Amino acid sequence: MVAPDRLTRGGVAARRLRLGLAVVLLAAFATLVGPAASRTGAPPVRAADPGTVRILIGPADNLDPAAQGDIGSAAISAQLFESLTAIDAQLQARPALAAAWDFQDGGATVVFHLRPGITFSDGTPITAADVVRSWFRIIDPAHPSPLVSLIGDVRGALAFSRGDAARDAVGLAADGSDVVVHLTRPATDFPTIVAGPTFAVVPAALDSGPTALQPGAGFVGSGGYVLTSATPGTTTLTANDRYWAGRPAIGTVELVHDIGGRSSVTAFEAGDVDLTDVSPFDATWLAYDDTLGPQLRRTDSLSLEYYGFDTSRPPFDDVRVRQAFARAVDWRRLTSLAAAGAATPATGMVPPGIPGRSDTDFLPAHDPAGARTLLADAGYPGGKGFPTVTLLGGGATDRAFAAEVERELGVTVQIDIEGAGFFDRLAADPPQMFSMGWIADYPGPNDFLGILLGGGASNNYGRWASSSFDQAVADALAATDPAAARAAFDRAEGIVRDEAPTIPLTYDVSWSLARTGLLGAYENGLGIIRMAGLAWDR
């Protein structure tokens, strides 16, 4: 998933992974540490209302699961609308609105069996037809989801989204209380994919327009909470009495958007928020604070920052030019210096922690002399005649990268700062290079490979196409043996390294403060908060 400065949501996916909350809470599988001694000897600040949790988080740009592409919006909508599955603490798909599922046709068909008696928050039954209707909203030809590629394994789905196929050609059907999904190939990770917020089940009223997303008594959802009120400074969520897993222990969640210009640490110390992200700089001293240190949390996010090239036009349609840029720079040194505790240098497109991820190093070799030879072979000896490169970015690495490319290749890189309309620009008039962030929509290697770089994928902003890469991904998804799947994904990553449509930079590290006594706070790196598992230790 992606969002301008929102860790691309990886959706929760398209998502520019840097906005929004860096705290990830998922199900009640873990407990925070016990009370810590205060610096003054007083007990740590506790919630004034034991039925309330206050979370510092940016406001949602769009609460419609099918329309959003940023992690900030997904982090909120995921509380309001539930999908058929959910991801547990071990990053495995578990039943949610679906009680179970099974595969047929050698893995090319998956049947989800809905729980009996599940309803929306207003008591209206949730049916298999509601699931199918919600998922068709992802592929609406008039307004396809920014993350439409996530449903690409469903037969006819992408063709329908392009207006090239009829509705009945799409492999989605309701059969009683079952949802039957026909896939284009065996894809046993599909139940994991649909755990993402994009696949949430929404009420029919949302088909009529965004008024169904207005807060108040008329709001209808399928998640643990309903939207009670919203102001520029605060969004209030109230526990859904009809939630399939039972009414959440926390009756009210206040999403705080404005802390009056104070730092998040100051707001936490004052007791105005119970969960908040903090900067890597603050984390360096918070770790040694007697009171705040035990409440400090580190998350190695399942996320990636990378550079992409526009491979559809010169000069980066020439693989030799991309290889020259990839090999001219010592990426490990560059990213280590720039990360400053906020990230770790990448070794490939798939971050650590993703099940099935290989430990093989897929970073391009640092070979400045070879890079100059490649650029000369492409017709630009010493950078002569090479156009000024525009890099759409603004991150800590960009200026150092530009200096290194000029020194080693004689090429000038001009940095344009990202702003509003980032994705519109990528779609209509892409720069030669762009900086992108992505956070996992689901914990699988394909979310960082086929979803980002597959031929025709909606998030393939560099428009790269490689039949050998697509085949490697297909082989991995069809494999039933984990070793065979890993080998095929490794083959795909090797192609990315050799053809350099992208250059992996860093894996994000985030820091947060979580109030002592708050149970069920669990960080798993997906960037989505599941608040229904929170509770105060009384």
Image (cartoon, rainbow, N blue to C red):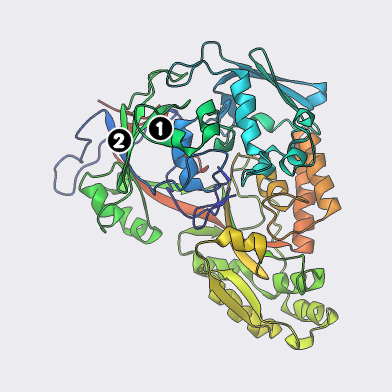
Amino acid residing under circle 1: Met
What residue sits right under mark 2 in the picture?
Answer: 53
Q: Quadrant of residue 411?
A: bottom right
Q: Secondary structure at mark 1?
A: helix
Amino acid residing under circle 2: Val
User: With 469 as the anchor, is 390 left or right in this view?
Assistant: left
What residue sits right under mark 1 in the picture?
Answer: 531
Identified at 76% across, 51% down, the residue is 456
Q: Residue 344 placed where, x, y %? A: 54, 58
| The residue positioned farthest toward the front in the image shown | 208
Q: Residues at badges 2 and 1 in contact (C-beta under 8 Å)?
A: yes
Identified at 63% across, 38% down, the residue is 138
Q: Nearer the viewer, residue 509 or 360?
A: 509
Q: Nearer the viewer, residue 484 or 449?
A: 449
Q: Is residue 120 above or below residue 235?
A: above
Marks 2 and 1, how far apart at CA: 9 Å
Q: Secondary structure at mark 2?
A: strand
Instruction: For label 1, count other residues whose C-alpha is less than 10 Å away and answer few (under 14), some (14-19) or many (20+).
Output: many
> Could you tell me if residue 193 is visible in this image?
no
